[in-house]
Image (tube, rainbow, N blue to C red):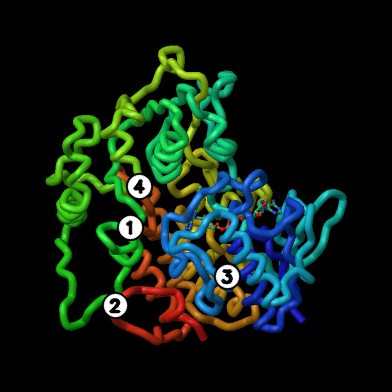
Amino acid sequence: MKRVAIIGAGPAGLVSAKECLAQGLDVTVFEKTDRIGGLWNAGTGHVWDGMRTNLSSDTCRFPDFPHQRAVDTFPTQMDMLDYLRDYTDHHDLERVVRYDSEISNVSQNNNGWDVELNTERKAFDGVIVASGFFSTPYVPKHWQEDERAVHSTNVGPFNQYSGQKVCVIGNAFSGCDIAAGLAGAKAKVRHAFRRPYWLLPRNVEGVDVDRLFYQHSDPENPKVKPSSLSGQYRQSNEYFSVLCEGQLIHETLKINPESAKPPYVAIADGYLEAVGSGTITLSAADHIDRRSVDADKVILATGYNTNLSFLDQTVRKALNYDASDRFMPALIGDMGLHPKLDNMAFVGMYRGPYFLTMALQAQMAARTLAGETLVSQADISQNVARAKELREMMVKPQFPYGDYTAVAERLASILGIEPKVKTGDFLPEHFAP
Ligand SMILES: Cc1cc2nc3c(=O)[nH]c(=O)nc-3n(C[C@H](O)[C@H](O)[C@H](O)COP(=O)(O)OP(=O)(O)OC[C@H]3O[C@@H](n4cnc5c(N)ncnc54)[C@H](O)[C@@H]3O)c2cc1C
């Protein structure tokens, strides 16, 4: 029986374990903390108390496993953790997880891979890297010494900031959500960022955001996309300018609807209302001089780096790994395979993985490690070349694989999975076995 090491017991590692067991592989999941769930743990992960998902529960789930408990349309962090525990129990995965087991090195041997932890070295036929794209909080150098500053990962309960002056830096998903949450907890929030994003609530006039964006393509009525990238960006900005019309009355939140730059989007409830009432004040600048920040606390919603330092130098070289690149730190395509790295696969290791794509990548990884040839070496090379092109783009989109439905459809078709439903809302359950 082939032995497979999976690194990480977050959503990607868990779904990989389930798929590998289904292929009859001998699986060990190495998890550096003492629990499953990865970033969905408040405290050891990267979420905060009471955080809600930014996509609905119908999207934040694996294809074969609905949420087992009654959850709100946008589940809380605790709901997601319960979901992952239920998934683990249902598939009896805990028996293959080794906790408190941080992998420190992974290197190729003659037959497969050596995996090292503490003083142990173990040999495996295959390895799945599922250690999380958003793995290490990024704290800009000039903030490292400032005692007022905490990374968004450690923001803690919002009510502790009540009555305080708080500066939130960064306006992607976490920054906007935290700024709105702190305003709701009666903090005086200054929100500082470089450039405005399009801001959407979780529910837009009765439609959940994921349903608004993610629909099966309609062959009767195909969407016409401009051929040039700048034309596509312009089309998207025009679309968002209608959806997000309310923000255009605020000078600092104005975005040109005709802009040919890639649109950047954030999802937060109550944000515009708080700006309107003055609970959130805004400042946009390329550089924020920390000495000029008048605040009791500073929340750094400045994102994450991806840590792949546990991979041996030859592996890192093959991946062209650059820890400082927060868009595409390693040349890993959306298939999660690499032409130079036999019997190694990557699951969830790109900016912005969703549950369905993680499940499809996991199936791809497991079937490949079990010996199936799903794609040619030429296709894998091309997939990695595409990652390189994305890395080298001068003006980068918000997410390298932002066309979620196209990525999922392509992976499903490689796996021979026909969606059960082909019209309307695009949901993971349509790709269930
Ligand atoms: C703040 C935030 C909010 C998000 N909100 C959503 C959302 O609403 N909906 C959504 O679909 N997605 C969301 N995402 C995307 C998110 O990345 C995925 O949902 C998912 O959690 C990724 O799972 P993962 O298993 O790849 O990574 P993680 O959840 O990060 O898990 C990785 C695991 O690997 C372990 N590990 C790392 N290195 C090692 C090592 N060397 N040895 C052993 N173990 C190791 C870690 O301890 C961890 O348990 C969000 C991301 C962030 C950062």
* Mark sitting earlier along the chain (3/2): 3
**Quarter of the view holding residue 81:** bottom right
Can you tell which of label 1 and label 4 is closer to the viewer?
1
- Is label 3 in a helix, a strand or a loop? loop
Please, what is the three-letter code of the amino acid marked with disc 1?
Answer: Asn
Determine the CA span between mark 1 and mark 2: 17 Å
Residue matched to label 3: 69
Mark 3, Cα crowd under 10 Å, few <14 / some 14-19 / many 20+, is: few
**Quarter of the view holding residue 178:** top left
Compared across the picture, whether 389 is left or right of 222 comes to right
State the quadrant of the N terminus: bottom right
Determine the CA span between mark 3 and mark 4: 28 Å
Mark 2, Cα crowd under 10 Å, few <14 / some 14-19 / many 20+, is: few
Residue 406, x across and y down, in percent: 34, 70
Determine the CA span between mark 2 and mark 4: 24 Å
Q: Residue at x 16, y 55 (%)?
A: 235
Please, what is the three-letter code of the amino acid marked with disc 2?
Answer: Gly
**Quarter of the view holding residue 414:** bottom left
Residue matched to label 4: 266
